[in-house]
Image (tube, rainbow, N blue to C red):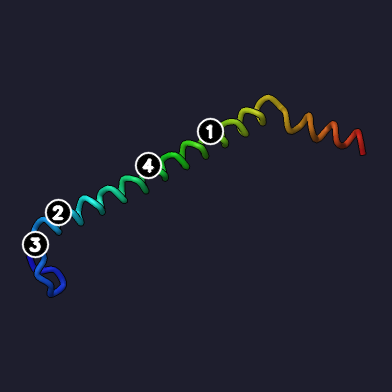
Amino acid sequence: MMVFGFDLPLWAVFAGGIVVVYIAWKIIKFAVKILLILIVFLGILFGLDVIGFFNWIQGLLSNFF
């Protein structure tokens, strides 16, 4: 098989394809983990805001200072 002017054997093309798919899978898996961590973090912040945690801290600090 000719790739960029070089004659590569078919097994090398398949091996390269497997490596590319493996690296792409690792990148996608990492991105999904980061997305889930971000969703959980924002959910916790939203929950704290709903129960009034930040208003309580603001009131506590304004009374202290």
In space, the residues marked 1 and 2 are separated at their CA atoms by 39 Å
In space, the residues marked 3 and 1 are separated at their CA atoms by 47 Å
Kindly report which numbered mark, 2 or 4, lies closer to the viewer in this rendering.
2
Q: Position of residue 28 (x, y in %)?
A: 36, 45
Specify whether 48 is left or right of 39: right
In the rendered image of this protein, does residue 14 appear above or below residue 8? above
Disc ID at residue 54? none
Q: Position of residue 48 (x, y in %)?
A: 66, 29
- Secondary structure type for disc 2: helix
Q: Amino acid at mark 4?
A: Lys
**Could you say which is closer to the camera, residue 25 or residue 36?**
25
In space, the residues marked 2 and 3 are separated at their CA atoms by 9 Å
Q: Which residue is mark 1?
A: 40
Kindly report which numbered mark, 3 or 4, lies closer to the viewer in this rendering.
3
Q: Which residue is mark 3?
A: 9
Q: Amino acid at mark 1?
A: Val
Kindly report which numbered mark, 1 or 2, lies closer to the viewer in this rendering.
2
Task: Residue at 90%, 33% (x, y): give it.
Answer: 63
Specify few, some or many for label 4: CA neighbours under 10 Å numbering under 14, 14-19, or 20 or more. few
